[in-house]
Amino acid sequence: MAGKNGMVIAVGSDHAGYRLKGAVAGALSEMGCRVLDMGTDSEESCDYPDFAIKVAEAVREGEADRGVLICGTGAGMAMVANKVPGVRAAACNERYSAEFTRLHNDVNVLSLGARIIEPVEAVGILRLFLDTPFEGDREGGTRHLRRLDKISDVEKKYSK
Ligand code: RB5
């Protein structure tokens, strides 16, 4: 999945993230991504789990290459997405976390806090999320693969 052209990105927000979702979707389109907008569709109060699960399932099912979630802090939506096996979501409201959760954790869902960051910063974080490769495939990166396997073991331990 090299480069952004043609990548399919599922995006979802609650009411707090609705405006930033518009800016994020616009930036993704400009970068050459295809955007799947999973809602919400207004600033009317709603429940973030309802939208986080749609994005997480789209990534799990392979409908989308990656997902972007936006709520007030990024925390609640990341919590929901991480309940879906195979999804590795991180709330990143600064660039270092965006870069290193790709390099070390192979994050496939980015969660943003619309009440914390400005749109221009969100786009910077988004670029790092899309452009930064996972280090696990490189020489010396096997420790990251081993750690991801241990995350999968935890999922298996608690799955019915
Ligand atoms: C909504 O007020 C807020 O709780 C939500 O957007 C999010 O920050 C939850 O994690």
Image (cartoon, rainbow, N blue to C red):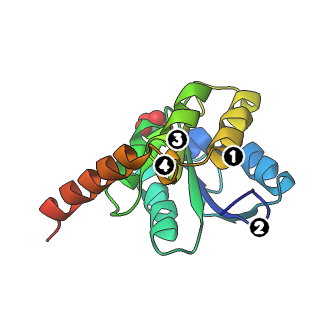
For mark 2, what is the residue? 6
Would residue 137 appear left or right of 94 to someone viewing this image? left
Residue under the point 59% across and 65% down? 65
Query: What's the CA distance linking mark 2 and mark 1?
Result: 13 Å
In the image, the residue with mark 2 has its CB under 8 Å from the nearest atom of ligand 1? no
Sequence-earlier tag: 2 or 1: 2
Element type at mark 2: loop
Give the x, y percent position of residue 59.
51, 66
Q: Are marks 1 and 3 in contact (CB under 8 Å)?
A: no
Tell me which image quadrant ligand 1 sits in: top left
Query: What's the CA distance linking mark 1 and mark 4?
Result: 12 Å
Element type at mark 1: helix
Query: What's the CA distance linking mark 2 and mark 4?
Result: 19 Å
Mark 2: amino acid: Gly
Is residue 124 visible in the rendered structure shown here?
A: yes
Element type at mark 4: loop
The C terminus is located in which quarter?
bottom left
**Disc number at residue 107?**
4
Callout 1 environment at 10 Å: few (<14), some (14 to 19), or many (20+)? few
Name the one closer to the observer, 148 or 42: 148
Name the one closer to the observer, 102 or 113: 102
Callout 4 environment at 10 Å: few (<14), some (14 to 19), or many (20+)? many
For mark 1, what is the residue? 131
Q: Are marks 1 and 4 in contact (CB under 8 Å)?
A: no
Mark 4: amino acid: Val
Mark 1: amino acid: Asp
Image vertical order of residue 42 relative to residue 91, above or below: below
Give the x, y percent position of residue 86.
38, 63
**Disc number at residue 103?**
3
Would residue 139 appear left or right of 44 to someone viewing this image? left
